[in-house]
């Protein structure tokens, strides 16, 4: 891509003046259409140091409505960003429906800067490329348009521009030792960047390499690329072909069996129950500090039938934990802001930082459970969600995070008994709603969804643990002891 790019192309001032005005007007029209049709767009402007990234973006946004776009200038990750996976900071910046997100540099520059340092960098770069392609594919499948432009200049041209900036009192502050170090390694980085672009040049997020020697040519080509991509993709999003998924991909994790049963051994003595829970709580308190010391994040997912006891179990799990080191994310119907984004957005934003614990009271599995059963998403959407979820969980584990997934199972008779108790107990009436009764009527439909969820997402790196919850004492004891045992393995 880079080696075949023509760096000699130029556009004279008169030609530029004649062509730029209609392009600017057309881009404004397309921005308004994107807003009206509620289509999100991501524009990536990346390239070599001193290739003109800032200048190009300045010209691109000159005639855009500033209320409809955000600009992210990507540099070194902030302290909080360093405590999360590579793509976390970019998930936090994806645009809402109808808006444009422009990235001055992006996940590409950060992956090159962060993953090519030190031994074993080739493996880390391959893993970063995999994460990037999944990120872009997931958003594209959800209706986001990607426009990726790489500004290419020669080593000679880069040196000239760096010297010009360094000798100018107004711009000398922009040039650092790192810029010159990168320039000296230009020839070494060239094949790495070439390979990076080649492996991330996909049908859903293709690259356009622009020879950026001449400013007029760079700006005109960028405008033309953005407009052509929008004009091509807007109709495809508004009138999609009837197919299972928009893009084709393969991801086949190793599935492990899930043991499900209703009969659970009783803890006959309350003293035994209380002693075992107290011991597990104490152990978890100690393990929490060790996880923090080792910078190991832990995510714990609780799913299950209504009235299965998720709330009470979580209360006992967190009983002795340091509140500064954990958070509980209760998952309900997405709010207006969450509805404007891809469904995984709200969960990834709440990933635990290194050394912290996040407990999800319901989770991303709502996509293949309640959203599937109640028709809140399309069949193609929940069908591809299995792969999206498996990939997300695999990446979290590869990053070094621990992940536990609990399914709390109750029998129909036990659920009815608990529903009735909640309706008649003034202190528990807030726990029961009309939706609970409606969901109970769909018991068999949920059963089918649960079976498929287990069959497709109980993976070797993130298996499901079923908690037989007709007996609350047993359920709580098993859950706490399972968490403590798993946390111990993370430290070994």
Image (cartoon, rainbow, N blue to C red):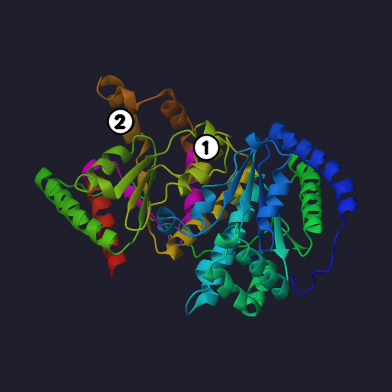
117 w.r.t. 214: above or below = below
Out of 464 and 43, give the one closest to the viewer.
43
247 w.r.t. 302: above or below = below
In screen coordinates, is 360 left or right of 30? left
Which image quadrant for residue 27? top right
37 w.r.t. 140: above or below = above
Where residue 145 sits in the image (x, y, percent)?
Answer: 69, 48
- Regarding residue 459, the answer to whether it shows in the image is yes
Q: Residues within 10 Å of mark 1 (few under 14, many from 20)?
A: some
- Judging by the rendered image, the residue that carries numbered circle 1 is 338
Residue at left 27%, top 43%?
Answer: 313
Magenta span contains residue 366: no
Residue at left 68%, top 67%?
Answer: 161
- Judging by the rendered image, the residue that carries numbered circle 2 is 418
215 w.r.t. 34: above or below = below
The region drawn magenta spans 446-473
- Regarding residue 146, the answer to whether it shows in the image is no
Where residue 218 sits in the image (x, y, percent)?
Answer: 78, 57
- Quarter of the image containing the N terminus? bottom right
In screen coordinates, is 82 left or right of 46? left
Out of 100 and 340, give the one closest to the viewer.
100
Out of 211 and 399, give the one closest to the viewer.
211
In screen coordinates, is 321 left or right of 216? left
């Amino acid at each position: 891509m880079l080696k075949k790019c023509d760096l000699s192309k130029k556009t004279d001032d008169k030609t530029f003046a004649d062509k730029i005005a209609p392009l600017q007007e057309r881009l404004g029209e397309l921005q308004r259409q994107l807003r009206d049709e509620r289509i999100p767009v991501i524009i990536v402007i990346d390239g070599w140091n001193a290739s003109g990234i800032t200048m190009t973006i300045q010209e691109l946004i000159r005639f855009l409505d500033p209320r409809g776009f955000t600009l992210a200038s990507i540099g070194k990750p902030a302290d909080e960003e360093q405590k999360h996976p590579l793509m976390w900071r970019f998930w936090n910046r994806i645009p809402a429906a109808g808006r444009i997100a422009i990235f001055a540099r992006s996940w590409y520059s950060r992956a090159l800067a962060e993953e090519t340092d030190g031994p074993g960098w080739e493996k880390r770069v391959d893993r970063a490329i995999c994460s990037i392609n999944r990120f872009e594919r997931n958003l594209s499948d959800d209706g986001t348009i990607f426009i990726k432009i790489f500004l290419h200049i020669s080593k000679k041209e880069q040196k000239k521009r760096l010297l010009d900036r360094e000798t100018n009192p107004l711009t000398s502050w922009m040039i650092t030792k790192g810029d010159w170090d990168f320039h000296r390694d230009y020839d070494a980085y060239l094949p790495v960047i070439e390979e990076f672009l080649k492996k991330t040049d996909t049908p859903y997020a293709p690259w356009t390499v622009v020879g950026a020697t001449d400013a007029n040519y760079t700006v005109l080509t960028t405008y033309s690329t953005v407009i052509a991509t929008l004009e091509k993709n807007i109709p495809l999003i508004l009138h999609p072909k009837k197919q299972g998924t928009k893009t084709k991909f393969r991801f086949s994790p190793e599935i492990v069996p899930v043991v499900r049963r209703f009969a659970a051994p009783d803890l006959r003595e309350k003293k035994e129950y209380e002693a075992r829970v107290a011991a597990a709580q104490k152990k978890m308190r100690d393990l929490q500090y060790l996880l923090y010391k080792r910078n190991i994040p832990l995510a714990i997912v609780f799913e299950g039938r209504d009235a299965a006891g998720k709330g009470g179990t979580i209360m006992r799990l967190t009983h002795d934990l340091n509140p500064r080191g954990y958070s509980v994310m209760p998952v309900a119907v997405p709010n207006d802001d969450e509805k404007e984004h891809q469904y995984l957005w709200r969960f990834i934003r709440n990933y635990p930082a290194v050394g912290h614990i996040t407990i999800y009271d319901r989770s991303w599995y709502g996509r293949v459970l309640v959203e599937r059963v109640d028709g809140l998403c399309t069949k193609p959407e929940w069908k591809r969600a299995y792969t999206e979820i498996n990939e997300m969980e695999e990446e979290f584990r590869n990053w070094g995070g621990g992940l536990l997934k609990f399914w709390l199972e109750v029998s129909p008779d036990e659920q009815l008994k608990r529903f009735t108790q909640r309706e008649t107990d003034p202190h528990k009436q807030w726990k029961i709603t009309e939706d609970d009764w409606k969901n109970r009527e769909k018991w068999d439909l949920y059963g089918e969804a649960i079976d498929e969820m287990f069959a497709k997402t109980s993976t070797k790196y993130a298996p499901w643990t079923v908690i037989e919850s007709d007996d609350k004492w047993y359920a709580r004891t098993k859950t706490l002891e399972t968490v403590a045992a798993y946390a111990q393995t993370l430290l070994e």
